[in-house]
Image: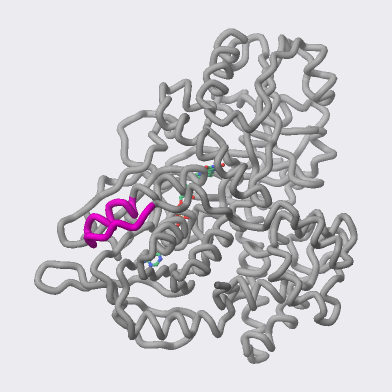
Amino acid sequence: MTADLSHRGRAANLARMASETFNVAVVGGGIVGAAIARDAALRGLKTALIDKGDFASGTSGKTSRLVHGGLRYLKNGKIRLVRTAVRERDLLLRRAPGLVWPLAFTLPAYRGRGAGPLSLRLGLLLYDALSRDKVLPRRAWLDAASTLAREPQLSPDALRASGRYHDALTDDARLVLAVVRAAADAGAVAANYAEAIDLAKEGGSVVGVHVRPRLVAAEPFLLRAPVVVNAIGVWLTAPYAAGVPARPLRPTKGIHIFVPRDRVGNREAVVLTSPRDGRMLFVLPWGRLALVGTTDTDHRGDLNAPVPEAADVDYLLDAVNATFPFARLARADVVSAYAGLRPLLGSTATRESDVSREHEIFESPDGLLSIAGGKLTTMRAMAEEVVDRVCVRLGRSGPRATREADLGPPPEARERFRALGLDDATAEHLGCRHDPETLARFLSEPRARERVDPELPFVWAEVDAAVEAEMAQTLADVMVRRLGLFYESMDQGRTVAPLVAARIAPRLGWTADRVTEEIRAYGALIDDHRRFREDHGR
Ligand SMILES: Cc1cc2nc3c(=O)[nH]c(=O)nc-3n(C[C@H](O)[C@H](O)[C@H](O)COP(=O)(O)OP(=O)(O)OC[C@H]3O[C@@H](n4cnc5c(N)ncnc54)[C@H](O)[C@@H]3O)c2cc1C
């Protein structure tokens, strides 16, 4: 079944949520909530999924975009965590080949900086050994000359050797959207911009959750379900969750920057060591850009709008400039920057980066489950564990189904886009973002095959699909999470935003005032994410 994820479908879903009774209500449409809804729906449970904002608008859309085991956690002895993540990575490579791609890494060993060759070699040996399926090429150890042949722009000073290994890359927001789509196609009833404001209890048991639809003036309603799952990430510390039993969370902030790749010169992914504190960072290839991350600092500000600060940006720039001496990057070179909050479980560990990445499930006798922690990569395994417990609570025995279920565009998507008459670059781009059957519905619309930004392969059909098949409700939903022009366009999409707003306005029934407001709000979002440039310094 192909679920209707247009704004009409959303309205119909909200009406169903207000009038029907569900087996389970999932609160939070980040990767974890989406994966739980998918798992539950595939087991035949009547499932509702809500998010107070857009799907993937929380941490899940602001990650390093890695589907990985987390090599650096081996240093902290987190073998079990790394083993689970490596195996989930391998599974995603097989089950979601359109969304998750292999990526080669160079891990340089410099004299006097970071870990030495012996511990790096041991780490890589263990990392490979933890993978059961061996879907990725094995590690290799390269001397300095071979390292520089692979990554010629690396600093040769004090370079001893490097490890070469593989992990995987994804577009995090697109991954979440694909999981929401899979959940909905399996029968889950999903709506974004629907906030859980209070738990509903009768006789000491949870009977559902009170929901307030957002964006339009609408009365709150009771979403009825005997089991409620909170997958609200860092918002477990927000007022809605005040009565939710859980260990304290320690939100830590991580920022990323996109910079022109030709300035850095990295061919593939490179692991950096911060010259300031020895932390491990990444520079990843993303088309003509390089993605650099990340930081890890305690966050005490607003949970809803974390932004990159100048000191965070400088920290990343220093790390790139130290390893790629010709880059000479300054703040003005940053194309875009973003910040996300890790929902880490409280710890007395002194360094933020030492706080555990493991997840934890909190269950209370009244029918409430909450989950926090974990990784984008391990979402399927986390969801399976949660839904096992939901089934026990409901006295149901739905067989587990996600391990065998495919996700996202099929492997032959690129060929099918070519067969639809699209050029190679466009077919390549669309093949890792869209199901050809769905996008084909929009390819005969006016200018559908033309580029939105002449420099980038995004086409107008994707804008139409965003609102008609991916539940985009605002201009930012389209620009940030459906297309990604916010990150990749040299002006973050400021120039084309009015054109995009004009295109989606009739589909979403927007008035002229609403169009103006959407363009203003998007401009303000860009400004907030560029404010770091105004700080004194470079
Ligand atoms: C900087 C950074 C980099 C990372 N990089 C990686 C990586 O490369 N690979 C990896 O595997 N992991 C990575 N992670 C970890 C991973 O991103 C997170 O563990 C994961 O995204 C958490 O997902 P979540 O669904 O729990 O939270 P979120 O994505 O934050 O989702 C929670 C959702 O709940 C919604 N919500 C909150 N309150 C309510 C309410 N009252 N009603 C309705 N909805 C509500 C929010 O709007 C939000 O969308 C990274 C994390 C950070 C911060």
Q: Residue at x 80, y 75 (%)?
A: 443
Q: Position of residue 42 (x, y in %)?
A: 44, 61
Q: Is residue 368 left or right of residue 26?
A: left
Residue displayed at 32% across by 66% down: 24
Q: Residue at x 34, y 42 (%)?
A: 345
Question: Is 414 left, or right, of 108 in this rendering?
Answer: right
Which quadrant does the C terminus fall into? Answer: top right
Q: Position of residue 213 (x, y in %)?
A: 42, 80
Q: Main secondary structure of the magenta part?
A: helix
Region in magenta? 386-399
User: Magenta segment: does it hold 378?
Assistant: no
| For residue 225, above or below residue 278 | below
The spot of residue 145 in percent (x, y) is: 82, 12
User: Would you identify the image quadrant in which residue 399 lies?
Assistant: bottom left
Report x, y in % for residue 5: 56, 75
The quarter of the image holding the N terminus is bottom right
The residue that appears at 58% across and 49% down in the rendered structure is 308
Q: Nearer the viewer, residue 350 or 66?
A: 66
